[in-house]
Structure formats: structure tokens, C-alpha cells
Amino acid sequence: MDERRKKQSFFFAELQMSPSCSSFEVLDPHDPVISRLATQLFKKTTDYLQAEMVAGQEHYMLLEEINRLAITKYADLRSLAANLNKTLNEYNEMYAQQIQPLLQQIDQIEVQVSKFEVNAYRLDSYTKQLKARFKELEEK
């Protein structure tokens, strides 16, 4: 473990003595190339971070717009569903009050027509029998 601490302390001592790791002071004379490169690095990093923030803000604004449109669309759909429900209830009431009694009358008329049809066939059959008898009596 002692050997590891020696290596760490040696490493940190080198870092403290290295001029490239010293703090950057505006008034301290530095290599102009390094200063220019550092300035370019900071500017490009700033530009990148600002672009990322703008992109994030634009995404957020887009999501807000999508949410607004979705709220509007769902409000329209809710209104449409309420109108459909109201219309359906009106049609159900109309069926119960107006159409169903008429359908029941039609069913009753159908039953009566069936009875009349049966009676008409009976009457037709009876008249045929009478006709046949009349012919028999006429022939005698």
C-alpha cells in the first residue's frame, strides 16, 4: 500500500509542477497559440452547449404544441361522442314511442291477413265443392 501512495504523491507532485496544469490567469503571459486554441475550444463548447439547449427547448415547444393539438382533438371527439349519444337516445325514444307501436300494428295486421287467407282458401274450396255439386244436380 505504501508503494501505491508513493506513486500517487509523485504523480500529483508532477501535476502541480507542470505549467500546462497551472490555473489560467488572464493577465499572465501564456503561449499565444495555446491561448487561441483554448479560446476556440471554449467558444465551440459554448456554441455546442447553446445549440443543445436550443434543440431541447425546441423539442419541448414541439411537445407542448402536440399536447395542445391532442387536447383540442380529444375535446372535439368528446363533443362528437356526446352528440352521438344524444342522437342515439333520441332515436331510441322515437323507436319506443312511434315506430314500435306501428310495428306491433303491422304484426297484428299480418296475423289477421293470415286468418283471412286461411278463410279465403276454405271459402274457395267450399265454392268449388258447391259448384261440383251443382253440376252433379244439373246432370241428373
Image: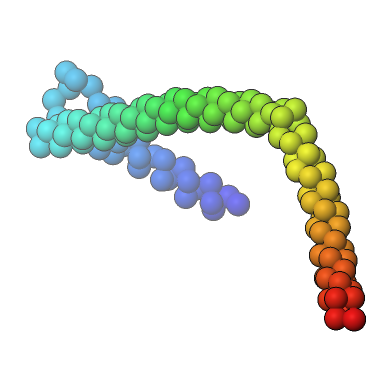
User: In front: 108, or 31?
Assistant: 108
Instruction: Identify the residue shown where x is 41% and y is 40%.
Output: 12
Residue 92, percent from left and from top: 71, 32
Farthest residue, direction left: 32
Q: Considering the image in quadrants, where does the C terminus appear?
A: bottom right
Q: Is residue 62 left or right of residue 100?
A: left
Apparent side of residue 116 relative to residue 90 in the rendered image (left or right): right
Q: Nearer the viewer, residue 108 or 122?
A: 122
Seen from this angle, which residue lies furthest bottom? 140
Foreground residue, 129 or 32? 129
User: Taking 26 as reference, is 121 above or below it?
Assistant: below
Number of callouts in the render?
Answer: 0
Q: Quadrant of residue 21?
A: top left
* Quarter of image, res 51: top left
Report the residue at 77% width, 34% height from top. 101
Q: Position of residue 107 (x, y in %)?
A: 79, 46
Image point 86% across, 58% down: which residue? 119
Residue at 39 percent of width and 39 percent of height: 13
Give how far across and how far down residue 67 sits, in percent. 46, 28
In this rendered view, identify the residue nearer to me: 98 or 117.
117
Q: Position of residue 76 (x, y in %)?
A: 50, 27
131 versus 29 height, above or below: below
Q: Is residue 57 visible?
A: yes
Up-down: is 91 above or below 7? above
